[in-house]
Image: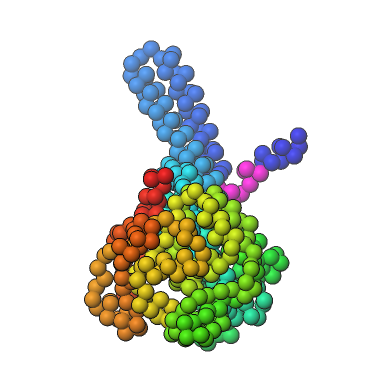
Amino acid sequence: MPNKINSLFKWFYPGIGLKRWIALSTFGIIILIFSSGRLRTDEFIAFKILDAVILFSGIIILILGVKRILRSLISVFVPVSRGADLLDIIYQNKQINRGPKVTVVGGGTGLSVLLTGLKQFTSNISAIVTVADDGGSSGRIREEFDILPPGDIRNCLVALADAPALMRDLFQFRFDTNSQLSGHSFGNLFITVMTRLTGDFEKAIKETSKVLALRGQVIPSTLNKVVLAARHKDGTTTVGENNIPKTHRSIERVYLNPDKPQATPDAIKAIKEAQVIVLGPGSLYTSIIPNLLIKEIVDAIVVSDAVKVYVCNVMTQPGETDGYSVSEHIRALIIHSHPKIMDYCVVNTSEVPKDILRRYADQDSYVVVNDRRKIEEMGYRVIEDDFVTIEDTLIRHDYLKLAKIILGFIEEI
């Protein structure tokens, strides 16, 4: 009993931000009791009108107090912007929590763009991310600390974060060249430290997810320390995900070492529960396919009843998909996985400004040709739409348009 009393008094501790609103609500209740009693007993019309006004004021005061109490409690669990309407916040979060179950597979910038759009409509998102990255900050961390690369994982965590913008910016902050931490992002270092503290990379991701208040979950495709390699059409081999595009040689096939990595149980569970499974967008050979080199993941996707969608890149990637049409992107996916890995292919149809195309051409990157007839002959349906936007002369997927296209498949189930 004493413990319960102590717990009750904790609600009135300084700094909690509830006392004033509890007092206001109590004052509103007192006014209601007092005015309703007088309203029943007063015989004069003028007094009845006055009592009714006081009664109405008490109702307003009570509603305001309760609303502020709820807002204070909700803000502990959900970031609340100043001026945001409480009912809108509750409704939005209820709707998002009831949203469809979407599992996306890939890595890199393309995947994080799609996640940014999807989280506006659902929090039931699972991002299965490759851990084959070995370049830049991730590569250095991987080599020095002997842990899985955090870079692609970090990008997806930030994309799904419901934390304040400053927290997202903090995780993406990159140290400049004048520092010993040159090239490292704060988020990569945070995940590294969390891994050392917890002793487990997967647990570190889950704990980081709590810090960022994720709308969904980010799952490494495997916890094995894999290395991506490519066999080129000229017979040569390139080892290392970061090195593959640099060779500018046509790729015949990519593979992982060790060659039979185990999928994470959470990845398989996410695939089984999904209503829609999305491959891409992202680098074909270095972001999407590495996940499909894990047999358990491919098997789970093939037998799934979910709608399976491949989002094709808008532009070819130098050193990786030079000269590829949409059907050639699909053919590469099938060669490395299974013909039933997808049902639909989403292709952009909007015009890209000529000055932007010239800048990309200077880097040997061109619009991916939409050879629809070949795709349909392969047995896949093509969804054509306009979902491109230009950001600082860079061609990007419009995350809201793309998310709506993906969620549109739910209506067809």
User: What stretch of residues is rendered in magenta?
Assistant: 10-17
Residue 374 shown left or right of residue 7 in the figure: left
Position of residue 316 relative to residue 177, above or below, is above
From the image, which quarter does the N terminus lie in? Answer: top right
Q: Position of residue 189 (x, y in %)?
A: 60, 73
Image height of 266 relative to 38, above or below: below
Q: Colour mode?
A: rainbow
Provide residue 315's location: percent of width, then percent of height: 35, 73
Is residue 16 magenta-colored? yes
Visible in this render: residue 163? no
Where 247 falls versus 167 (above or below)? below
Which secondary structure is most common in the magenta stretch? loop
Residue drawn where x is 47% and y is 57% of the image? 340
Of 343 and 216, which appears nearest the observer?
Answer: 343
Extreme residue in the front direction:
377
Along the viewing direction, whichever of 281 and 252 lies nearer the viewer: 252
Residue 19 seen in the current view? yes
Residue at 61%, 49% (x, y): give it: 14
Q: Is residue 140 above or below residue 76?
A: below
- Residue drawn at (42%, 44%) of the image: 413
Residue 247: in magenta span: no
Looking at the image, the residue that sits furthest to the right is 2
The x and y percentages for residue 80 are 47, 52
